[in-house]
Amino acid sequence: MTQKVVYLDNNATTMVDPKVFDAMKPYFCELYGNPSSMHRFGGQVMHAVDKAREQVKEFFGAKDAKEIIFTGSGSEGDNMAIRGILEANKNKKHIITTKIEHPAVLNLFKYFEKQGYDVTYLGVDSVGNLDLNELSNAVNEDTALVSMMYANNETGVILPVEKAAKIVKQKNPKTKVHVDAVQAAGKIPFDVKNTDIDLMSIAGHKIHAPKGIGALYIKTGTLLPAFIIGGHQERGKRAGTENVPYIAALGEACEIAQKSLNYEMHEVKRLRDKLENGILERVYNAKVNGSTTNRVPNTTNIGFQYIEGELILLHLSDLGICASSGSACTSGSLEPSHVLKSMGVPFESLHGSIRFSLSRFTTEEEIDYVLKVLPDVIFKLNKISPYQKELKALEEKFRK
Amino acid sequence: MWDYTEKVMDHYKNPRNVGEIENPSAVGEAGSLVCGDALKLYLKVDDNGVITDAKFQTFGCGSAVASSSVLTEMLKGMTIEEAAKITNQQIADALGGLPPQKMHCSVMGHEALEAAIANYKGEDVAAHCDEKIICTCYHVSEKVIREAVEENNLTDLEDVMNYTKAGGACGQCHSAIQKIIDEIKNKKEKVDIKNMSTTQLVLKINNVIEQHIAPELRKDGGDIELVDVKDNKVFVSLKGMCKSCKFSSNTLTNFVEASLKEHISPDIEVVEV
């Protein structure tokens, strides 16, 4: 493969920032000590962990570095928060989440539903927005936990988690609020200390740190039992010798992400909008899925009507373009995206939905290249579709 | 990322015979927009029943387009009778194989072909609508599941999902699908007893007696013993309570013989000694 890769699948994972890679390198062959050791060789490594925790604290906008626990992934943070809160509140049997969560949360809620929990799954409207009244009505005396995502991985639509947390606490101050912030991290500013959010999880590999590291924010005063029982590491909540190089990487990635927020919210957004508008101007059977006003700046989800997503991805891949699809065929399961289905996206768009997700490393030339080659791919595939009449109608409407 | 063969990639990149045939001799459709894949197959057949042209339009993934494309290539030059013998496995083979989760694409090609042939013969397409639907999510009929199981020797639920998509969504039909698999499996295990050695047959009969017949009789204080087997005749003796039971002849034909017939062969005859 000598072809240049245009990577527009940053919601799946990101490139490790070379600066982040530099920050982790010393902790393999040089500073390889155990942070728990008594000797200075290990002790200096502890400083690296402390520094990273401070960087991650700043990133979350938390009050105290003690509120940060390093985890192995976003899914682990979600599990640690949700399982922990339920274990600490065994007498409460009602939990709330949304229908559009990542499987890391959704499947965990389904698991607890089978265990006998009463679960409320909040729906979304046609552009992916939540009804806060529905949330308010759902919270009761028996509600142990509300878990919702900050931004949706497929559409980029932002959920009003701060307002939601406030509403939850007004209804029941004892109900805990967990936010899966994996897809919002590095794309919008966090200020968790000034919110009612109790727990918030992120994953390193979505913000240019390596795969295999994440963090969970636990507000001071939140009772959470140990997730991994063993040594004293991570305040005894997650035992096991610290993954120092990856922790250092996450710290660095968080600091860079915070400094890059302005670029992300303006420049990345400009490129995303250029891509989205460019496609809508050129392709008659293209339609945006989800809100265009209430989104993280890097994501667009476009439904190409009457053609199928995997086929589009395969053809784009041949041109070096990486994206992803909510189509059933790409997942190995037979079911198309539960997120788009919850929004009521019609089947002709649902199966042909493509997510493009940019990063601060995406260039203008890359977007121009996609806009140059993508329309012809779509028009070629349109010719194979059995829905010629429907496509013709869309084309005529577009020309008018 | 799917592990597609070079042939599959060639066919989805450069699909053959895309489009409609004007005034076709037959049209066959399979799948739907809701299911995520749909295929429309057009055939032109000459007076001798030879397929002179085949074209397709497909809504679906790479392997769905490749299956449709390769099918049109296979069909050209065949007679309708020859075409009717094409199986979904042959479509997959022509592509150098498909990933297991994508076998349903070859099944869809086969379904559209069947529909086109029925259409050519002037058979009532509406008759197909009366078929019993097992999977309502993907609208998969009992007939399609049976054919897929029989032709491809499918042995479990996951296979059936991969080949037909049936059961892939809500899961309510899983037990119905399992029943079809079990039934076909049972039927297959029934072999012609003439081709078995006496020892094989005795072992098989004894197995069925021990597993399915004796436990039931023992519940009522009876028992059964296998005495001899000659050709299709099975000689047994009833023991315990069964011996003195006035319904024993009833037990013998309605239960013992019926069980052996079901599990081994309909030719079996039971004789009490």
Image (tube, coloured by chain):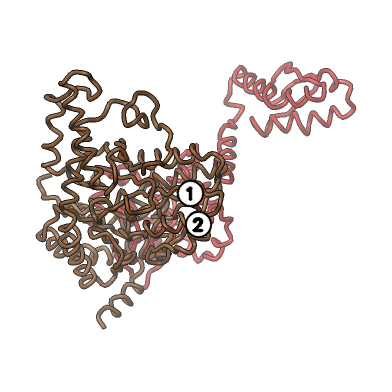
Chain colours: A brown, B red
Question: Where is residue B13 shown, x and y percent of the image?
Answer: 23, 55
- Real-space Cα distance between discs 2 and 1? 9 Å
Closer to us: A292 or B128: A292
Residue B29 visible in the displayed image: no
Task: Point out which mark residue A175 bears.
Answer: 1
Query: Where on the picture, by quarter, is residue A381?
Result: bottom left
Which image quadrant: the N terminus of chain B? top left
The residue depicted at 56 percent of the width and 51 percent of the height is A141
The residue depicted at 84 percent of the width and 23 percent of the height is B242
Query: Where on the picture, by quarter, is residue B54?
Result: bottom left
Q: Can you say whether A243 is above or below A111 in the image?
A: above
- Per the image, label 1 sits on a secondary structure element best described as loop
**A93 with respect to A214 (left or right):** right
Closer to us: A60 or A348: A60
Q: Can you say whether B179 is above or below A166 in the image?
A: above
Amino acid under disc 1: Thr
Q: Do the numbered discs 2 and 1 sit on residues whose CB atoms are within 8 Å?
A: yes
**A21 with respect to A234 (left or right):** left
To the question of a shared chain for discs 2 and 1, the answer is yes
Question: Where is residue A159 shown, x and y percent of the image?
Answer: 36, 59
Amino acid under disc 2: Lys
**A226 with respect to B3 (left or right):** right
Task: Point out which mark residue A171 bears.
Answer: 2
Closer to us: A300 or B156: A300
Question: Where is residue B22 shown, x and y percent of the image?
Answer: 34, 72
